[in-house]
Amino acid sequence: MITNICATMQLTIQAIDMANVSINQTWPCPTYVSVNSSSNLSISGICAYNELQMYVHQTSGLIINSSIVCPDKTYVVASEQAYITNLCANVELDVEVYDLAIVQSNTSWLCPQKTVVTATNVNNSLSFCALNSMIINVINSTFVYNSTQPCPTNITITASNGSNVFNVCSSMNTNIYAKNSTVLTDEFGCSSVVNVTATDLAVVYVCATSAIYAVASFNATIYYKGPLASNSSTNGSKIIPWV
């Protein structure tokens, strides 16, 4: 057992097995924090001013103290049955999730400027947001955009292997590549321009105010709402109005 840990500049924690680690939350947060945990016990009170890196595995849990401070940059890798709660970032949030891991954000903070989400075989639905740039890469996973937050300026989505992506939106540009997956954009948050490629039975709903560029193949279906600037459909695919 290690209790009342604190640091002003850098704090690095590595916990395994039944390690019991606690942080002294009466001190200010360190500038930089890195946590690598596969402990069966959770670690709470984690915080950082500039950068927070977290790697959690097995049944490990990390509870972030984001009630007062939100780091500029946050990087997360969570796998197996690990969990992380109260996640936030001001500038960039990079989340990589696998298996049964659960990663949840603190929605009381503003969205990061940039958010990157990578999910592989994740059973739990993920929900994050961004102000400027959002990149979503999902394989056999489900992502739902946090619709209580504003749409990002630009969003890029890559969905494959039976993934589901819902409520996504952007104010300027949306880029979608969907393979054997479902992608549903928010019809009340239409982009200016949409580029969409759908293949292998994918089903995609898109809307735009200026232009939609659509390519469908191998029995994929694209439903569109807005000006269709160009389209190509082959091998039993369809591009039809979204009504």
Image (cartoon, rainbow, N blue to C red):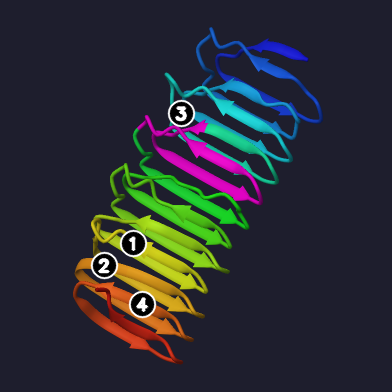
Q: Is residue 41 magenta?
A: no
- 3 and 4 marks in contact (CB < 8 Å): no
CA gap, disc 1 and disc 3: 30 Å
Q: Is residue 80 left or right of residue 229?
A: right
Quadrant placement of the N terminus: top right
In the picture, residue 194 is in which quadrant? bottom left
Q: Which mark is residue 222?
A: 4
Is label 2 in a helix, a strand or a loop? strand
- In this rendering, which labeled residue sits more in front, label 3 or label 4? 4
CA gap, disc 3 and disc 4: 39 Å
Q: Residues within 10 Å of mark 4 (few under 14, many from 20)?
A: many
- 1 and 4 marks in contact (CB < 8 Å): no
CA gap, disc 2 and disc 1: 7 Å
Tally the numbered discs.
4
As drawn, which residue projects farthest toward the right? 17
- 2 and 4 marks in contact (CB < 8 Å): no
Residue located at (26% from left, 67% from top): 207
Quadrant placement of the C terminus: bottom left
Q: Earlier in the sequence, mark 2 or mark 4?
A: 2
Q: Earlier in the sequence, mark 2 or mark 1?
A: 1
Residue indicated by mark 1: 185
Q: Where does the magenta region start and end?
A: 86-109
In the picture, residue 184 is in which quadrant? bottom left
